[in-house]
Amino acid sequence: MRLHIRHETIYRYDRQVKHSVQCLRLTPRTEAGQKVLSWELQAPGRRIEQLDAHGNLVHLLTLDTPHEEIRISATGVVDTEVVEDSSPSARAGLSPLVYALETSLTSVDESLKDFAMGYAVPEMDEHQAMRLAGAIRDAMDYVPGATAVSDTAAHAFGLGRGVCQDHAHVMIACCRLQAVPARYVSGYLLSEHDDHIASHAWVDVWLANERRWLAIDVTNRVLGGAQHCRLAVGRDYLDACPIRGVRRGGGAESMQAQVRVSADALPRSPIGGRSRLLQQVQARQATSQQEQSQQ
Amino acid sequence: MALNEMFESDGTVRPHYRAYAEWLAAMPSQRLDEKRAEADSLFRRAGITFAVHGEATGTERLIPFDLVPRIIPTAEWDWLQRGLKQRVTALNAFLQDIYHEQEILRAGVIPAEQVFRNLQYRPEMQDINVPMDVYAHIAGVDLVRAGAGEYYVLEDNLRVPSGVSYMLENRQAMMRLFPELFANCSVAPVEHYPDLLLDCLRSVAPAGVRDPTIVLLTPGAYNSAYFEHAFLAQQMGVELVEGQDLFVDDEVVYMRTTQGPRRVDVIYRRIDDDFIDPLAFRPDSMLGVPGLLMAYRAGRVNIANAVGTGIADDKSTYPYVPEIIRFYLGEEPVLSNVPTYVLRRPDDLAYALAHLDELVVKEVHGAGGYGMLIGPRASKQEIEDFRLRITSDPSRYIAQPTLALSSCPTFVESGLAPRHLDLRPFVLSGSDITLVPGGLTRVALREGSLVVNSSQGGGTKDTWVLER
């Protein structure tokens, strides 16, 4: 499937920001199942790029002239296909075991532990993973604004509500409780529903028997597929989120993001063209901004 | 019966303590009392205090300094030095391997699980090349003597080991208080430690940098070791900076100065990994430098110690260190490990649970002597409480036999009495591997106590390595 993606983010600050540094994971991963035909990142300031530990392309922006807003846009075309048996462990040279450890965002409490143990299996496979994902989705309504970016898996699970980030963290936590490696995936989703944001998050679950990662979109109760475009993976949201920044000064901030994903079918694809979708996301977005005290 | 560093079991003075013992015998006790008071005021004036965990916020305490030195004979030091260099060389090779090819895992010497399912393994370091392949530039290896005097390594501190300023200040104080002693006993100097440290840091500057700019990165004045940070920076003649004094631009780290930005090549950091870069590690850290990890990955700046050294000094890796030495160096270890039961292993767990009253049990991720059980000194209740903690998550614990630590005469309320000791020499690794003869001797001031941590009421002594 050929996905046309446009993602714009604007930060506005109440006061002038003296210095800011932004870490962007806004370029689709080069890996089996997706091919980047074109991609353009527009952002102010000086920029360097590197691959991080998880094989994500990272851009570091430095802005050291006073500014009151930052506009970042990512635009491009990506071909995606469902890859049944790629060996995704080669996507980054890291051992899958790295993704079996609890992080603060995927931390659990007794109630989440009890829930997860109800789905414990001797060997994780596609069927069991989907069963777990379905149970999580049954237990957690999709409610935008119900949680904050810094909420843990245990917290969101306790609320019984959350967004894709929370569904992903809870799924990851449940896998790790059984010593099954699982990782966070950030990316875009082609969706026909307006209530699911297109800047999306899902998970990869490690199937040790088959030696491969299985992508599962918990929020939508589906396997990852051609409608998903993968930007970054990591141990949790913090490793993979599209924008992570630190600034000096600026006071309060507001953030506006707009993601548009549309598709036209590849010549041999059985699925016809899809309608264009437009989504607006405000306030809560994949970002973590921190203001550093000025001294 | 624990070995006494100064006396043989029949009460005669050991040869290497003879000159000191004669001097001490000739010293009127009133004069010694005066000297103790003088020492107190010396340290207070120097501002050497230590913030204590678990006490009211802001409590700062003077670390008690004891006037009786710990003395190590020449031959013993030569042997120790050989063992320390061997151990640190192997641990650096281990870190290089773990963050690159991982041959030791493929050879099955250490289970992969042991490394990768440990928070101290930092995926961020995978495949990053560091200058000279050195990770632990400064190692503070804790040694104890037990039984008839065998040395054991208690732990390898490879993250941000502290305490070297006490080694230096203790020597300075002793020389001021008792200059005549140093005329009579040939004590090897330690004062050049800051020079060696500076040489070490200069030698690991990024390739192509001829006259590197070095800074010492401190978490700030509220850190318990801030005195040491300021002291070392001043002694080396390098800038003492906090995170907000540095910034990253185009893969280069700069320091803000009154003359404008100045490029930084080597950062001697005294901040934990978690806080060093809010864009890579804990996002709430106000202490770090945003983007530092990317400059580091690009090879434009070096960080001492490297990020991720914790995987080599973690208590769960410790039992493997003898094998690590054999694997990388093809040599038998000079220094012994304390025999260790790894409670993740069912057999070890069963043994430990049956012998809790004899063992020291430590938390794998603990530090500072808090999360530990000292079986022989614990009450029945304490043992039972700890048993529950262990059985709920055995993999978090290791256990070791209680060692009869050596002791040394120490001034206490009632006069001179033996108190237990340990020793932390500081090993510097750069283009060379060096150490000053000596280290920090810590002493447990409470009678019978085996815990020497300054946060737990320990004191310090000057450490003498004799030159002949």
Image (spheres, coloured by chain):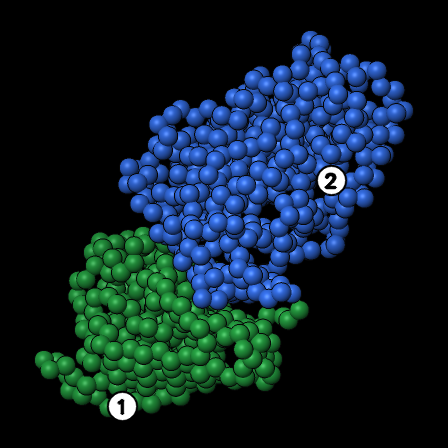
Chain colours: A green, B blue
Asked whether residue A130 appears in the rendered view, the answer is no
Farthest left residue in view: A268
Quadrant of the frame with the N terminus of chain A = bottom left
In which chain is the residue bearing label 2?
A: B
- Which residue matches tag 2? B63
The answer to whether residue B138 is left or right of residue A29 is: right
Density class for disc 2 (Cα within 10 Å; few <14, some 14-19, many ≥20) is many
Which corner quadrant of the image does residue A192 belong to? bottom left
Instruction: Give me the residue at 68% from left, 20% from top.
Output: B186
- Rendering coords of residue A217 (x, y %): 30, 72
SS at badge 2: loop
Amino acid found under the numbered disc labelled 1:
Arg
Point out which mark residue A276 bears. 1
> Of residues A32 and A295, which is closer to you in this image?
A295
**Residues at badges 1 and 2 in contact (C-beta under 8 Å)?**
no
- Rendering coords of residue B376 (x, y %): 61, 29
- Rendering coords of residue B239 (x, y %): 63, 54
The answer to whether residue B127 is left or right of residue B199 is: left
- Rendering coords of residue B346 (x, y %): 40, 37
Amino acid found under the numbered disc labelled 2:
Ile
